[in-house]
Amino acid sequence: MSVIYDRVALIGLGLIASSMFWAMKRGGLAGEVTGYARSEATRATARRIGLCDRVCESAAEAVEGADLVVLAVPVGVMGAVAADIAAALKPGATVTDVGSVKRDVIKSVGPHLPPEVHFVPGHPLAGTEHSGPESGFAELFDNRWCLLVPPPGSDPVAIARLKALWEGLGSNVEEMDPDHHDLVLAVTSHAPHLIAYTMVGVADDLRRVTDTEVIKYSAAGFRDFTRIAASDPTMWRDVFLTNRDATLEILGRFTEELFALQRAIRTGDGAHLHEYFTRTRAIRRGIIEAGQDTDAPDFGRGQKSS
Ligand code: NAP
């Protein structure tokens, strides 16, 4: 593969940025990659493990002369970081982000960027429950989706170049409208995370079941919940605060269905339960039949995933 951007700046050096760095190196997709993270500790770790060609002491220094700037920080600080780097951005540069919520990021980042800079928000649908500069790996994005959410009127050349980068990182790329993105992610990721957090919290509260029993007898279901519930608290706090409307809508529906199932269990309505579980089984079959997914529990992705 060939170089797509001569200079890339990664702002935030956690799971996603470090995975992007290793995947860019794997594919020879970038010339020099600079990086910046808020804490001295993370910057020191990045230098020690060779994460980034140059680790800078400020975000503004990192973006100087960059053709692509990637905001890979929690969603809640995207706007502040954009304000910080705005004056240092090179005219004609592309700014993108990897945030899990899109409408809020567009609202908080967009107004800070100068008109001669292209803003093409994005979201790689790939992750693990690990965070920090040492958690990344080059294969994270292989065969996963990356959604680009360019505002109307965005430069098609800038979009095509970013798309080529994500394809080089191993992803399949699609464009989506921000509101639709936030609703889709509320269903597929945000609400399920909240449910996992709740279930693990409930198990923790149940003093009649000891910690040892929970660990010893946790079959795949609960183990998966604990893995998801171990995800970064800052990132997920920001996801729920910024994708409030879509998450609340989905949780409202979830609660209604949960009450219906609760009633069916209490009243012994086996027909309702059987009919419901038959429908959900068909949904899984539909997902498998819809595309590249397989019948494997992880839909055949064969790697760490969230
Ligand atoms: P992470 O591993 O927790 O890393 C976050 C990075 O952001 C750290 O390097 C942190 O620096 C830095 N940071 C935080 N506040 C900052 C600030 N004000 N200025 C500069 N740097 C700052 O996070 P991640 O998992 O890579 O997530 C990054 C973004 O990707 C989030 O928006 C998240 O929604 C999105 N995302 C995550 C996943 C996932 O599964 N993890 C998947 C897709 C998208 P310090 O270490 O110095 O605090």
Image (cartoon, helix red, strand yellow):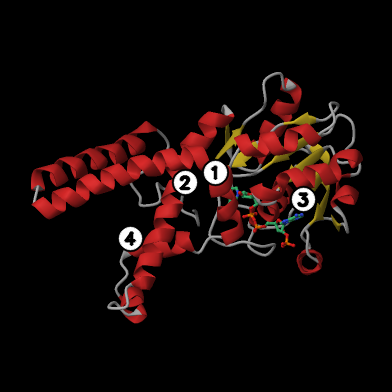
Q: Mark 3 or mark 1, which has the lower sequence index?
A: 3
- For the residue pair 288 and 81, the one nearer the viewer reads as 81
Q: Nearer the viewer, mark 2 or mark 4?
A: 2
Which disc number belongs to residue 189?
Answer: 2
The amino acid on which the numbered mark 2 sits, given as a three-letter code, is Ser
Q: Is mark 3 within 8 Å of ligand 1?
A: yes
Q: Is residue 301 left or right of residue 42?
A: left
Marks 3 and 2: CB-CB under 8 Å? no
- For the residue pair 57 and 208, the one nearer the viewer reads as 208
How many numbered circles does the render carry?
Answer: 4
x, y percentage for residue 260? Answer: 21, 45
With respect to residue 142, does 37 lie above or below?
A: below
Helix, strand or loop at mark 2: helix
Q: Is residue 210 left or right of residue 201?
A: left
The amino acid on which the numbered mark 1 sits, given as a three-letter code, is Leu
Q: CA distance from mark 4 to mark 1?
A: 22 Å
Label 4 neighbour load within 10 Å: few <14, some 14-19, many 20+: few
Residue indicated by mark 1: 125
Q: Mark 2 or mark 4, which has the lower sequence index?
A: 2
Label 1 neighbour load within 10 Å: few <14, some 14-19, many 20+: some
x, y percentage for residue 115? Answer: 84, 26
Residue indicated by mark 4: 221
Q: Mark 3 or mark 2, which has the lower sequence index?
A: 3
Q: In the figure, residue 49 lies in which quadrant?
A: bottom right
Marks 2 and 1: CB-CB under 8 Å? yes
Which disc number belongs to residue 11?
Answer: 3
Q: Nearer the viewer, mark 3 or mark 1?
A: 3
